[in-house]
Image (tube, rainbow, N blue to C red):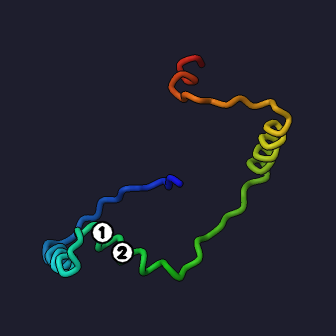
Amino acid sequence: MVQDVTQIKVTLPDPLMDFLASKAGKFGVTVSSYVKNLILNEVKDMDFPVYPMSEKTEALGLQAIEDYKAGKTKEIKNIDEYFAKL
């Protein structure tokens, strides 16, 4: 399963960066991996928020499911070709 990812940039004072590099070095990992691990440990027990869809979005989604079941959809095998033909 492929997950979406987001890259972030964080500006840190040099003393804090040195501290993180030292801590990461003790575990033999990069600073990025160390910070990622800190974040994962911080949120591991938290529930991710779930937001309900708007009525309009839900209706569009349900219609798309019905269209799929009725055979009204088309499989796109090459997205570049698809957009080139639009």
Pinpoint residue 40: horizontal percent, then vertical percent: 42, 75
Residue type pointed to by label 1:
Ser
The residue to which callout 2 is attached is 37
Q: Residue at position x 74%, y 48% from top? A: 57
Q: Are marks 2 and 1 in contact (CB under 8 Å)?
A: yes
For disc 2, the neighbor class at 10 Å (few under 14, some 14 to 19, many from 20) is: few
Q: Disc 1 designates what residue? A: 33
Quarter of the image where one finds residue 70 = top right
Residue at the spot 79% in from the left edge and 38% down from the top edge? 68
Give residue 65's position: percent from left, percent from top.
Answer: 79, 43
Q: Which quadrant, please, contains the C terminus?
A: top right
Helix, strand or loop at disc 1?
helix
In the image, residue 59 sits, relative to residue 11, either above or below, namely above
Residue at left offset 71%, top offset 29%:
74
Instruction: Give amino acid for label 2.
Output: Asn
Against 39, residue 53 (above or below) is: above
Q: Residues within 10 Å of mark 1 (few under 14, many from 20)?
A: few
Image location of residue 5, percent across then percent down: 44, 55
Q: Is residue 18 positioned above or below 5 on the image?
A: below
- In the image, 85: left or right of 33? right
Element under disc 2? helix
Residue extending farthest to the top is 85
